[in-house]
Image: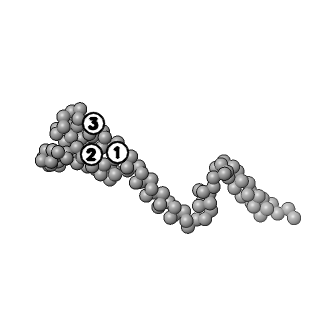
């Protein structure tokens, strides 16, 4: 794989920088493909310092794009899942109360219901 990519970069030397950065971004977005062959190819084609710099740029930009893509994707998935549970949706969008306060109020309400049902002292 590495040899083919080295040949490809050498064949398109004028665009090799952009091809390498784009390949690094794609590898980062997929997340399961190791980028070691691409880093080695960059070192062979561009030399140690330039190859390291190009790999670093590609990995950093790829990580940022992957973070944004996954964040938006997971956000949509969880919003769709939470729409089935109105109480969870209300809790998620509650901005004025802290989680601690919400937890105390919820626990107090559960304790009051339990106390009324179990200890019916009437």
- Most foreground residue, 76 or 121: 76
Frontmost residue, 116 versus 9:
9
Residue in view at x 45 percent, y 56 percent: 72
Measured Cα–Cα span from mark 2 to mark 3: 10 Å
Q: How many marks?
A: 3
Drawn side of residue 91 relative to residue 107, left or right: left
Residue 44 position in % (x across, y down): 16, 38
- Report, in whole angstroms, how far the alpha carbon at label 3 lies from the one at label 1: 12 Å
Q: Which mark is residue 21?
A: 2
Q: Is residue 68 visible?
A: yes
Say if mark 1 contacts mark 2, CB within 8 Å.
yes
Give percent across and percent down for residue 22. 27, 49
- Residue occupying image coordinates x 39% and y 46%: 64
Residue at image point 71% right, 53% down: 105
Specify which label sits upstream in the sequence, 2 or 3. Answer: 2
Crowding around mark 3 (Cα neighbors within 10 Å: few <14, some 14 to 19, many 20+) is: some
Left or right of 47: which side holds 21? Answer: right
Q: Which residue is mark 3?
A: 53
Q: Which mark is residue 61?
A: 1
The secondary element bearing badge 1 is classed as helix
**Does residue 3 appear in the picture of this structure?**
no
């Amino acid at each position: 794989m590495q040899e083919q990519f080295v040949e490809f970069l050498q064949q398109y030397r004028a665009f090799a920088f952009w091809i390498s950065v784009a390949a690094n971004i794609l590898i980062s977005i997929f997340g399961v493909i190791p980028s070691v062959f691409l880093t080695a190819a960059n070192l062979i084609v561009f030399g140690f310092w330039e190859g390291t710099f190009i790999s670093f740029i590609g990995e950093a930009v790829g990580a940022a794009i992957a973070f944004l893509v996954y964040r938006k994707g997971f956000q949509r998935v969880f919003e769709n899942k939470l729409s089935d549970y109105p109480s969870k949706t209300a809790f998620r969008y509650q901005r004025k109360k802290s989680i601690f306060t919400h937890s105390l109020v919820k626990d107090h309400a559960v304790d009051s219901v339990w106390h009324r049902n179990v200890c019916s002292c009437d």
